[in-house]
Image: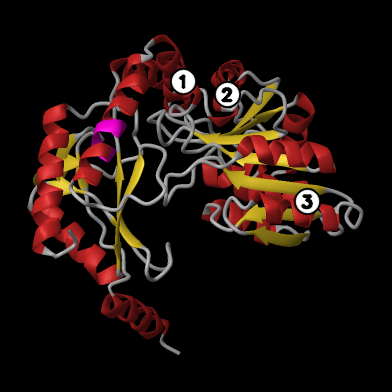
């Protein structure tokens, strides 16, 4: 069999349906104004919420660490790959998130894909929100535990599953995104926590899109005043913190369990010194410069108000993730292409990432955007919306 024929057939099928990814190339820094495929563009699809990826303090910290610690660690964390910088970062994460301890992973995906299957075994049960991120889904699939899914944010159904399962399994884990990445809505974490405590279940929240955004930047647990009530917080540095890497935090016992059991942590080379130093600097900047979080929410409010006033449907969004709901995938693809032609980079989110009738342009706010930027974007969205008969 010629496997290149297989690859081509599959890709051609995606292209015919308008479901293939068209990779655009960013030429320069991840900042509000940058070049995409050679064109000066306003970026509205970056997860760099606080505009920190090019912050002078993060850049300087990375350069200094490169000079002092070299380009790489030379090993996995469990052997010779844990440097003093890695330990310092984990201390900073724990301090920032107000938890007992933490463990840094190479990516947020690695944290979920590595820790979840090590936590739960045969005879256990994992209960997951139906709209959880793919990294959670993959982590759950890798586990030998039984699985249950509750309808999105439906606490009555979660309660029912817990009541029916409480005495049938050795351990129960309830896991949810904090902020849901496609719709921008927030998990009812207080209710989830209360149900877990009542029924003896372990609670696990993925705070990837809440880090640097909710709770004055500290995250969703701080947002809901749940300090000490969530067993495991997972997060990432690749979004609001402007760098890369994942982490889990909670008790010291949980950390020690994770570093002994998580294969993605044990078997991957550790993150390079420059990355770690920039992550440390990002936490320090969020704490010492509150203007970044304040500007993010100011821009978010202005953007949402402007879209709604022009007749756009922004779904259930409560956060800087603001979808412009369009329905069919080809329409979302066309809308995105027209935006790029007009100088705005905002990606279409289409099936299978969302349901077939839920395609949208997912816009992401950034603290570095100016009012002039937002007004230009709103005028452009309105122009294309009318052109394509969306509004």
Counting other residues with Cα less than 10 Å from the Cα at mark 2, is it few (<14), some (14-19), or many (20 or more)?
Answer: some
Of the pair 144 and 256, the residue shown nearer to us: 144
Q: Is residue 185 positioned above or below 330 on the image?
A: above
* Residue in the picture at 52% in, 52% down: 133
Q: Quadrant of the N terminus?
A: bottom left
The mark nearer the N terminus, 2 or 3, is: 3
- Helix, strand or loop at label 3? It is loop
Of the pair 33 and 157, the residue shown nearer to us: 157
Mark sitting on residue 216: 1
Asked whether the beta carbons under mark 1 and mark 2 sit within 8 Å of each other, the answer is: yes
Mark sitting on residue 222: 2
For label 3, the residue is 120
Q: Residue furthest top?
A: 288
* Residue in the picture at 37% in, 69% down: 357
Counting other residues with Cα less than 10 Å from the Cα at mark 3, is it few (<14), some (14-19), or many (20 or more)?
Answer: many
Q: Residue furthest right?
A: 167
State how far apart marks 1 and 3 are (Cα). 33 Å
- Helix, strand or loop at label 2? It is helix
State how far apart marks 2 and 3 are (Cα). 27 Å
> Please, what is the dominant secondary structure of the magenta stretch?
helix
The mark nearer the N terminus, 1 or 2, is: 1
């Amino acid at each position: 069999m010629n496997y290149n024929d297989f690859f081509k057939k599959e890709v051609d099928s995606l292209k015919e349906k308008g479901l293939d990814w068209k990779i655009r190339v960013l030429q320069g820094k991840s900042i509000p104004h940058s070049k995409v495929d050679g064109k000066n563009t306003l970026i509205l699809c970056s997860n760099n919420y606080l505009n920190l990826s090019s912050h002078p303090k993060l850049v300087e910290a990375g350069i200094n660490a490169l000079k002092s610690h070299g380009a790489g660690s030379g090993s996995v964390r469990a052997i010779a790959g844990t440097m003093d910088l890695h330990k310092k970062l984990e201390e900073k994460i724990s301090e920032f998130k107000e938890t007992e301890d933490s463990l840094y992973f190479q990516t947020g995906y690695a944290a979920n894909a590595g820790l979840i299957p090590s936590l739960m075994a045969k005879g256990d049960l994992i209960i997951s929100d139906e709209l959880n991120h793919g990294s959670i889904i993959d982590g759950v699939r890798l586990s030998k535990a039984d699985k249950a899914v509750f309808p999105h944010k439906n606490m009555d159904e979660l309660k029912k599953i817990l009541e029916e399962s409480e005495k049938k399994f050795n351990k129960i884990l309830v896991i949810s995104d904090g902020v849901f990445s496609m719709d921008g809505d927030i998990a009812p974490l207080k209710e989830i926590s209360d149900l877990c405590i009542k029924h003896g279940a372990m609670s696990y929240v993925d705070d990837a899109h809440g880090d640097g955004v909710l709770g004055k930047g500290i995250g969703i647990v701080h947002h809901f005043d749940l300090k000490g009530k969530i067993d495991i917080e997972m997060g990432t540095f690749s979004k609001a913190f402007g760098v890369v890497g994942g982490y889990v935090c909670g008790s010291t016992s949980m950390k020690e369990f994770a570093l002994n059991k998580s294969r993605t942590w044990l078997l991957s080379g550790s993150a390079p010194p420059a990355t770690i130093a920039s992550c440390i600097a990002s936490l320090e900047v969020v704490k010492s410069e509150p203007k970044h979080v304040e500007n993010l929410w100011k821009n978010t409010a202005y953007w949402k108000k402007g879209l709604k006033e022009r007749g756009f449907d922004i779904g259930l969004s409560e956060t800087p993730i603001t979808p412009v709901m369009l329905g069919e995938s080809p329409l979302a693809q066309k809308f995105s292409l027209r935006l790029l032609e007009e100088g705005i980079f905002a990606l279409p989110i289409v099936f299978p990432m969302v349901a077939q009738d839920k395609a949208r342009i997912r816009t992401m706010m950034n603290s570095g955007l100016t009012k002039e930027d937002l007004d230009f974007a709103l005028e452009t969205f309105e122009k294309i919306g009318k052109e394509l008969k969306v509004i």
